[in-house]
Image (tube, coloured by chain):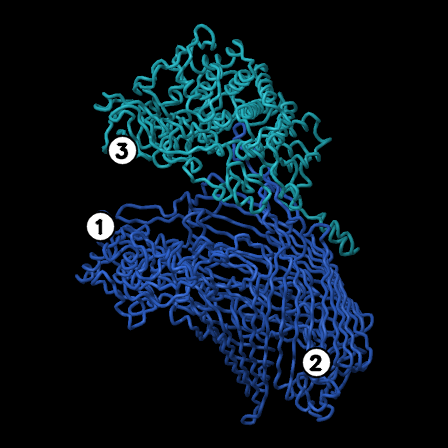
Chain colours: A blue, B cyan
Amino acid sequence: MKKFLLTLACMLSVCLAALAQNVLVKGVVTDAVTKETIPGAAILVNGAADNGTVTDHEGKYEITVAPGARLVCQQLGYANLEKKVPEKGGVLNFALEEDSQLLDGTVVVGYGTLKKSQLVGSVENVSGEVLEDRSNSNITRSLQGQVPGLNIIQVDGKPTHGGSVYIRGGATSYVSKSASGGAKTSYSIGQGGSALVLIDGVEGELSSVNPDDVESISVLKDASSSVIYGARAAYGVILVTTKSSKGDKISVTYNGSVSINSRTIKWEDNVICDGLTYVETMYDHWLGNSATPTAEGKRPTKMNIYAIPSDYLERYREHVASGATNTYEMNGKSYLYYGDYNYLKMFYKRHNASQTHSLSINGSSGKVSYGLSGRYYMQDGIYKIGNEDYNAYNLRSKISVKANDWLTFDNNTSIYRMNYDQPIFSKKLSSGVGSQLFQIAMMGFPVLPPTNEDGTYTVGAAASGYAAFKDGNSAQIDNKLTVTTSTGVTVEPFKDVFKVRGDFAYKTTRRTLERYIAPVQYSTAPESMTNYVSQADSYKRRYDYSTEQVTANVVATLTPKLGNNHNLNVVAGWNLENYNYHRMGILRQGILYPSKPNFELMDGSEVTLTQDGSSYGLVGFFGRANYTLLNRYIFEVSARYDGSSKFPVSQQWGLFPSASLGWRISQEPWMKATRGWLDNLKIRANAGSLGNGTISPYSFLTTMSINKTSSVFDGALENKVGNPNVIPDNLTWEKVTTYDVGLDMDVLKSRLSLSADYYVRNTTDLYIAGPEIPAIFGASTPKGNYGALQTKGWELTLAWKDSFNMAGKDFRYNVKASMWDSRTWVTKYYNQSGGIYNYYEGKELGEIWGFRTDGIFMSNSEAASWYKDEFHNFVPVTGPYAGDLRFLDRNGDKVINTGSWTLDDHGDLERIGNEAPRYQFGLNLDFKWNGIGLSAFFQGVGKRDWYPGRGSDFFWGGYSRAYCAYVLKDQAGDNHVMLDKSTTDWKVANADKNPYWTRRTYGVANNNTGALTFPNDHFLQNAAYVRLKTLTVDYSFPEKFIKKIGLKQLRLYVTGENLFTWSPMFRHTSMFDPEVIGNGDSDFHDGTSENMGDGYSYPMLRTFTFGINISL
Amino acid sequence: MKKILYICAAVLGLSSCEKFFEREPEDKFAANMFFKTETDLQSYTNGLIDSAIPDADDIALGSDTYTDFCGTKDSKQFFQPDRYTAAIASGWSYSNWSFLRKVAYMLSNMSNAKGNVSEAKYNHYEGVARYFRAMSTFNKVKKFGDVYWIDHVISPSDSSLLYGPRQDREFIMHKVVEDLAFACENCLSDGIGVNTEGRIYINKYVALALASRICLYEGTYRKYHSVNPSTGKPWNGEFESADELLALAMKYSGEIMESGKFSLHKNFRELFTSAKLPTDEVIWGRTYSEDLGIKHSVTYKYCSTTSSQLYSPTKDYVMMFLRSDGKPVESGAVSMTEEFKSRDKRLAATVLGPGQKMKDQKGNDIDFAPDFTWTVSGYVWIKWVMAEYAAMNSSANTSVNSMPVLRYGEVLLNHAEAAAELGKMTESVWNSTIGELRKVHGGITNSAYPGSADYVADQWLRKYYTEDVLHPASLSDIQLEIRRERAVEMMLEQDSRYDDLMRWNLGDLIERRYAHKGWRGVYVTKEEAENGFDFNGKHFTVSTTKASSETNYKITSSDDRGVTLSEGKYGYIIYNYRLQWDDKMYLLPIPVSAANVNPKIGQNEGWQWL
């Protein structure tokens, strides 16, 4: 802190001194040949990118600088021109010469920038503009589909969820069915990891960045570009650079928008909530499970915990036939209900609002340039009942002080604060918190009113979570604060030739996560209350998390001037990272006053405390040399030598090198003939190796924990030390080796450009369990660096931009389309049993094993004559009937089975599809004319299979569980098999309608060995989709008009997000958003429970945003 | 703060990486920092005790419940004809060996503490670790014969051990005996942790008691088995001989007797049913506690329909008990209402007899009668049954009776048997061992030394142990009486009966129960069969229909798992259940899965891989 104050004091004194002597300089920038003025040209003070101004539309500029300073004028397509400021200021005009290298924008790369022509790695540069107009809580949502090879897996639409970011490939861990049937098991290979995100050089989270602060985002995709980040960069690097002040004028910008959100899928519209239809359907499924041509079948006597008489259906029919409107009657002493309630409708709002406001001030005066920005984002809840509330705040301050010609100090500080309240529901501490969509499936039956006449809750309200939401006393409250501050000093003893920058950053996050569950009661009869969540089971839990992160860098950059034929750019540096993480948890049961869930106001006799944490450190030395010969032969080598505290002393250090070659064929003398149309043709190739050190910090240490004995020692439980863990014989870095070839081409004056990459990535030394070891070893097989994966993929981008004159105004448009794909195979793994759901050598990640089918049986006799199977075996039903699927006997053993789920014995299971998204694409369209802009962005997945999980009632409805509350419209009428049961040889009555949904039977998709539990190609969904991600219409008021009211810019826009989606799977299900078909809300389950069905998530939102940008 | 300094050092000097990289988890110990103080040694050995001390189910529901003296609803798969194979065998997974790894870890690292604790303390803790190594290894020898001797922390590259053949039983037992000798020598005999209330810590006496048990086991095993059952080859005699082992058993048990620290507890039933371990007799034991919520389900498992295996004492077991005058019973054909009269007091403390009371929820004494939904023989075990929980037909995890693991009574039996097997039994040894047990525990006033004038030999007993068995041995009356006494005293305590049958080479008794058909239960007289009879407040009937399963001895004609009467309409209740014994069953087979990883492991003699 002292240090900081000192620095601040220094900065202030320097800047005051500088201010005193400044002079005013103004002038015009023109094209040296055409004499036309050039608007938008940058005037940089001493060539520093963060200190300067930009010419206005007439090519004029004005700047206050120290006398004797040097002004550099820069404009894309022109050579830089530098001039010295006269002692007393005055006029200084620039006449720019066209640059021979048209395409020399700079690109942010690791620890520096390179000209685009020097680039040999696969780097995608995204301007901050793609984030504009997007009212999103999180940048990852705006980046989705924008960068080829950048795969963002969204889990749902929750404002706190930003999706996982993978570069070139997806997650390598997955959840799959276990060998014995339906239960899900998590599988992971190695340490995995996702892209490293650096925000102004400090590791951080994309979610904590104010989108309006972003100047550019660089995605480093291959080893060549990311090796400089060594052991943290195995899965790619995303560099976020925030905006810096550009000129000496004070510029103030306000962006504000309000949005109306609605869910992309309105579940409540796709379910049938007529009570009688519900009961009939439920009976249908119930009897389908047990009725045979000779036995009537078992009738339900309860619906989950709601008891019903066995003649409920008949009574219901009579009730409806009589025209009665009462929603309940007495059945003995208890209520019997006849409602038509739509619980989804009772839980979810049709629309919710969000808004964002951001304000920034940038400017510079003399030697000081500064920027201040702030943002507020809020999103209103999606629930009708229960308080949901999301708020996020950003604050950033940047300051840069040029102490003298060769010394610059800067500081960049940001604060991010987020709080998120959401209602939750749980029965008991031990049962965890459930997704309300699952709870509704279990107990939100249409027949059950939420409240009884006396105002008490019904069993449906209590068990579906309605009561807890409505009472508002069961919630999760998440508060997060991130503060990052980075101070740097740049020494440039030889201007534009050699500079050294050192910086030191400190980042800390404080987070508290509270959950409390209040008691809930309901009544099934007048004057009688039952506990659903008893007072003793109610609880509150709080976790306090804190992390601290220190980053220090020293980077030297050398760019000697070696004449026109040689271009050298050398970077060398040192980096240190230190991380600390702590967690403290408190838990107590027995809430006394539900409105005040305070630990003091509880009566549980035990308070459970947890405390843990970890720390690790990394040190790296790195370097990169980029040499361009004759403007066409590019050589680049980079390397990083990384040390990590996560490895044993003998394995602490790893060297990660890469080498690249680039050849700009278009610059060859013999290509002269093509100059007219071919602006650029470059071939790139590189190979490199990276390390993955994201292993848990103490894996190599034998550690022991203290806990209490379970046996009684002299009247008490004593302390004991647990088993020492088994450590690997050796433990080293996982290695990622990539090979990349690429091609960049620009033709027709850069109107058309193409970029393509092909890569192979080998991940070796993955940290997995080794070969099985004899039992006398005394511990499970130790892990080691044994596994390997291979990923192959390509990326392709095609862009066209042009302009023409329309009605006297410039009409500019550009179209950019990109597509990418990757596939990953397991090349080394120890899978003793050969289980097909686990990894095995040769497995392609994402593959789905299942049955092939050939339609449905049209009659019982047809079904009976088919091969026996193991799945239609609910006593007394043994074997399939009319309307069931005909599984094919693929292995010719005349029986349909799964074998033992191993490669050697997988019965009739085959690879029937793959759930990894393939052929992902993005399409940007932009039109601008006379201040009016229209832009559209389409995004999608070209190929993806999906087999809904067993607990996925949104897909399976009554085929999943016995009383499933969701009667889906997709499964009604001729969409499902109707049986003619007039003879014992049942027949499919609506065969001509080709019904998709098979004979109604509950549990058939949810039982451990149900007929639909294992994937089959009949119900395998094609989850490819195309989505109009955004559509924006905007209007910028003419400058001359707004200048009068003192504005630089005034722009209004309307943006729609997720406006339109098409997917083949919509033919069979209307309950899913294809972007988020995975497991339910990750806040509330561990990813393994089958009860957290696919799609049981926070909904994706369709958003209409009205916004305004004002600059002055 | 230190870390910050390191960082600063690293930032400034670009050095000090070694320090910077030194990290330790905050909620755990790094092992190399451990074993430095006595507290470390103690908390680690607490962990050993906690893992290794048998729990309630191990103690009270062990292998004894599947022997000649205990009928069950189902048997172990092991004894069911042609069911058990190497393919389905278990007991050889890494979790079965993790404890030995844990012990080895301490023995390999505890030298950290040298100099910080006194030599005596150091040796004590080493003794504790070796006690557990001996105990755990011995348990593996009992099951698999030839096993491995784990005397260091095995590393994955230790291939000669990991992928080598099993080691010879005699070598292994030699190492076990060495460990026991060390523990007996070095574990403390006074001071902290010795004979505390809870009786859970390891000390000299615990070590002596276990040593006497193990040496007796192995000594008699070598004596009554002519071959090593792992190999089918005769014992090579390279290490301790049978007699040397028996002499050790006698020595170790003698040391406890001479110490005078222990005596027999006057109330036999209290030994097994009280919440506090009687400290006069119990040497090592496991305490359960209502206050701490550490409870077990043993009462529930003996007295409930739902979770029980219907564990039931047999007539043969009841006949083992002498009359209170020290004489054997003349016949088993006596009604259950009669046969408990004038018997060794231990009978009524072990098997439910007339007049036995239990308690209701309010704590009042109530009649306690058998229930045919939880017995197949008509008899009911009450040895471990708490009066407070039996009658309530209680639920799981409610019992809090603490359990002896090693007790003075067994030490006396070990001493007597070792002496007898060595031919060193004298009347004075007899009186201080068997005589003492019969007097204090059994209430038998006159326990005549076999050969003395008062002694009445039990022909039924001789027949039971020596006729119609696969390996008849010539047994003296002394040996027979000791075998009786062990059953009477120790039945249902850990695997005492099962182990006895194994070491005496009498495993076939498990198959050869009554007429090779099944277990023989209570005797129903002709009159009782016709008119029924009353027992502890309930009226019992015998019929082929199922009037009430609780009070009706339901007779079926089924040959397997049916109940018949030995004389047709009356006689002994026979629970027909075919079991199978084969001499290979003295050991379990090595599971196929183990051979898949280590083909050199070798199978036990008689068992097939396929």
- Mark 3 residue element: loop
Q: Residue at x 72, y 58 (%)?
A: A654
- Circle 3: residue type: Thr
Give the residue pinned by disc 2: A104
Work out whether residue B199 can be spotted. no
Whether residue B194 sits left or right of residue A618 in the image: it is: left
Q: Earlier in the sequence, mark 1 or mark 2?
A: 2
Q: Chain of mark 1?
A: A
Outermost left residue: A322
Q: Marks 1/2: CA distance?
A: 82 Å
Q: Which mark is residue B517?
A: none
Estimate the x, y position of residue B162 in percent, counting from the top left.
Answer: 62, 43
For the residues tagged 2 and 3, is the chain the same?
A: no
Whether residue A152 sits left or right of residue A239 in the image: it is: left
- Circle 1: residue type: Asn
Give the residue pinned by disc 3: B556
Give the residue pinned by disc 1: A331
Estimate the x, y position of residue A166 in percent, counting from the top left.
Answer: 58, 65
- Pointer 2 with pointer 3, Cβ within 8 A: no
Q: Chain of mark 2?
A: A
- Mark 1 residue element: strand
Estimate the x, y position of residue A703 in percent, counting from the top left.
Answer: 63, 43
Q: Is residue B40 above or below residue A17?
A: above
